[in-house]
Image (cartoon, grey):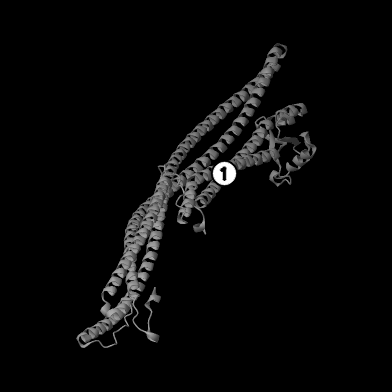
């Protein structure tokens, strides 16, 4: 089906199809990456909020301080996605709630089951146990549930997808318009030249051939068409000259015949002795004879005259037959030669068009080869970029591992601080006991010991809170290491795929070179055929001219012998009808 399409359609349809596929793939991947990144950020935000609020919620639960619980959730309430928070005691009863009432009910139910089983998939519930440590023993004193809405994240993702789709559509329209303008620039002069050739083939030799001043293939084709037009015009002029020459020959023949008739008339007048027979013979009647006997001395002349006339009659009969055969043969040869000349000219024109088309195709394939080489270089650069990105990801993993190690060291230091606070608390307790034994003298020391004990208790609580935050940070760093490792693996896979694409492009470039070489050989052969056809056309024209001359001479011979009457009465054959 594509064979009947124009060159513009054959180039634009596959190109636009490839562009649509590429833009669709890039848009889909970008949308998926954007959605995944937003979802991951949302989950990290929920987990970080839960980790930051759990310590304050545990303290508020232990101290039964709802104001502290309210202050704990106050930063989270400023988030646009925050919907509710619930603190439940160890019996599952609400101690503190904030946010939307329906979400609070759903959060209360979510505390007693898997949050992923919630019927409302637009709400994300994060449940965290509330723990408190007393004298080195850790106990669960309740549960905290926070709820965040996913609707805004989904809306942002849909908006991003719509934006990417609009960008892809705009790029497709822009590339399509540029490709259409480029193809119109290429095929427009070819269409104009085709219309000019149609006019020339219909005999309109006054048609002006455009684009002859161009230096590209279009200009070469236009100049070739101009040369063809001039050749046809020259052939027409030669034909007119040949017609004038033929008319001049006929005029000279007519003059010769008139002179011959005048000479015969003079001879007839001069030979009165044979007036009747010679007059009949002079009129072309070969059936004439001298039937009346002549005197004896002239009888031989009469017999010789009659025998000569009879012999002449037989000879002219054969000449008439031969002249008619020659005339018919030369006419057939002339007709066939003219047909052959016309077909040879058509074949030469077709070969010229074929050679021009092959030149255009060879040029297009050369352009495609250059574009393929450029695409291969771009693929090599993309592969190098993917390798560099993999190295960056490995460095990021190493840096996050060092952060994780530092966090572990900080946790150990905090453990030492917690141990020191515990020992200080014991010393303060012993000091209080000794102060009590001292009575009134140890009251001041007892007050100091109590203050030291409270200070040690607060230091231990702060150390435990910091340790909890460090542990949460360590977990988040581990998650980040896993994600960076996954990203590095994906980049390595992308690098491998880019390498395969580079190999495919190299194969396409090799095949395109082979096609270009083959087309060059075909183009050379077609040009050689075109030259041979031009030589054949010249030979056919010479043969046609020779056949025309032979036909003219045969026609003159036939007209000369047609003047004679060979038979009389019902047996008379009039050879003039052959004309």
Can you name the residue that lies furthest to the right here? 101
Along the line of sight, which residue is nearer the eye, 569 or 513?
Answer: 569
- Look at 77% across and 26% down and name the residue there: 67
* Vertical order, 85 against 280 (above or below): above
Is residue 318 visible to us here?
A: no
- Look at 57% across and 38% down and name the residue there: 479
Along the line of sight, which residue is nearer the eye, 139 or 378?
Answer: 378
- The quadrant in which residue 166 appears is top right
Is the residue marked by circle 1 packed among few (<14), some (14-19), or many (20+) residues within 10 Å?
some
* Vertical order, 222 against 533 (above or below): above
- The quadrant in which residue 547 appears is bottom left
Question: In x, y percent, where is residue 536?
Answer: 33, 61
- Residue marked by disc 1: 172
- Look at 62% across and 36% down and name the residue there: 41
Can you name the residue that lies furthest to the top here? 441
Question: In x, y percent, where is residue 346?
Answer: 41, 60
- Look at 52% across and 33% down and name the residue there: 400
Is residue 53 visible to us here?
A: yes
In the rendered structure, the answer to whether residue 267 lies left or right of residue 49 reads left
Q: Which corner quadrant holds the C terminus?
A: bottom left
Along the line of sight, which residue is nearer the eye, 206 or 420?
Answer: 206
Along the line of sight, which residue is nearer the eye, 423 or 84?
Answer: 84
Element type where label 1 sits in the image: helix
- The quadrant in which residue 215 appears is top left
In the rendered structure, the answer to whether residue 221 lies left or right of residue 156 reads left
* Vertical order, 453 against 513 (above or below): above
């Amino acid at each position: 089906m594509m064979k009947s399409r124009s060159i513009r359609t054959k180039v634009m349809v596959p190109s636009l199809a490839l562009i649509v596929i590429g833009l669709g793939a890039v848009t889909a991947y970008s949308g998926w990456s954007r959605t995944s990144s937003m979802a991951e950020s949302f989950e990290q935000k929920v987990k970080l909020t839960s980790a930051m609020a759990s310590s304050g919620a545990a303290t508020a639960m232990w101290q039964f301080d709802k104001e502290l619980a309210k202050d704990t959730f106050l930063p989270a309430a400023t988030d646009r996605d925050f919907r509710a928070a619930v603190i439940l005691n160890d019996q599952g009863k609400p101690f503190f709630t904030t946010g939307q009432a329906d979400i609070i009910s759903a959060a209360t139910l979510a505390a007693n089951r898997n949050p992923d089983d919630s019927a409302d998939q637009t709400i994300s519930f994060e449940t965290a146990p509330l723990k408190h440590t007393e004298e080195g023993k850790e106990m669960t004193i309740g549960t905290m549930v926070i709820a965040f809405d996913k609707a805004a994240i989904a809306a942002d993702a849909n908006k991003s997808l719509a934006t990417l789709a609009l960008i892809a559509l705009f790029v497709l329209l822009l590339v399509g318009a540029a490709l259409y303008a480029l193809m119109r620039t290429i095929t427009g002069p070819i269409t104009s030249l085709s219309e000019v050739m149609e006019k020339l083939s219909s005999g309109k030799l006054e048609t002006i051939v455009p684009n002859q001043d161009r230096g590209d293939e279009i200009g070469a084709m236009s100049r070739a068409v101009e040369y063809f037009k001039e050749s046809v015009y020259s052939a027409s002029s030669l034909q007119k000259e040949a017609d004038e020459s033929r008319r001049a020959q006929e005029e000279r023949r007519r003059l010769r015949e008139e002179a011959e008739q005048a000479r015969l008339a003079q001879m007839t007048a001069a030979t009165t002795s044979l007036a009747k027979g010679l007059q009949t013979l002079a009129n072309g009647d070969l059936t004439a004879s001298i039937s009346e006997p002549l005197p004896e001395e002239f009888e031989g002349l009469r017999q010789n005259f009659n025998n000569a006339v009879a012999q002449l009659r037989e000879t002219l009969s054969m000449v008439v037959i031969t002249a008619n055969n020659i005339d018919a043969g030369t006419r057939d040869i002339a007709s066939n030669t003219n047909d052959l000349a016309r077909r040879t000219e058509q074949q030469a024109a077709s070969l010229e068009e074929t050679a021009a088309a092959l030149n255009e195709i060879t040029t297009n394939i050369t352009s495609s080869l250059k574009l393929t080489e450029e695409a291969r270089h771009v693929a090599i650069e993309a592969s190098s970029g993917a390798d560099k990105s993999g190295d960056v990801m490995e460095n990021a993993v190493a840096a996050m591992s060092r952060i994780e190690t530092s966090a572990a060291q900080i946790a150990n230091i905090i453990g030492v601080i917690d141990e020191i606070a515990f020992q200080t608390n014991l010393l303060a307790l012993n000091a209080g006991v000794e102060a009590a034994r001292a009575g009134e003298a140890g009251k001041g020391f007892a007050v100091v010991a109590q203050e030291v004990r409270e200070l040690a208790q607060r230091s231990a609580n702060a150390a435990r809170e910091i340790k909890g935050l460090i542990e949460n940070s360590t977990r988040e760093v581990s998650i980040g290491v896993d994600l960076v490792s996954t990203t590095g693996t994906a980049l390595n896979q992308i690098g491998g795929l880019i390498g395969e694409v580079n190999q495919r492009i190299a194969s396409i470039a090799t095949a395109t070179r082979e096609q270009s070489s083959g087309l060059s050989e075909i183009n050379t052969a077609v040009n050689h055929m075109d030259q041979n056809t031009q030589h054949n056309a010249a030979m056919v024209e010479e043969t046609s001219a020779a056949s025309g001359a032979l036909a003219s001479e045969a026609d003159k011979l036939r007209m000369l012998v047609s003047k004679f009457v060979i038979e009389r009465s019902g047996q008379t054959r009039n050879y003039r009808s052959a004309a």
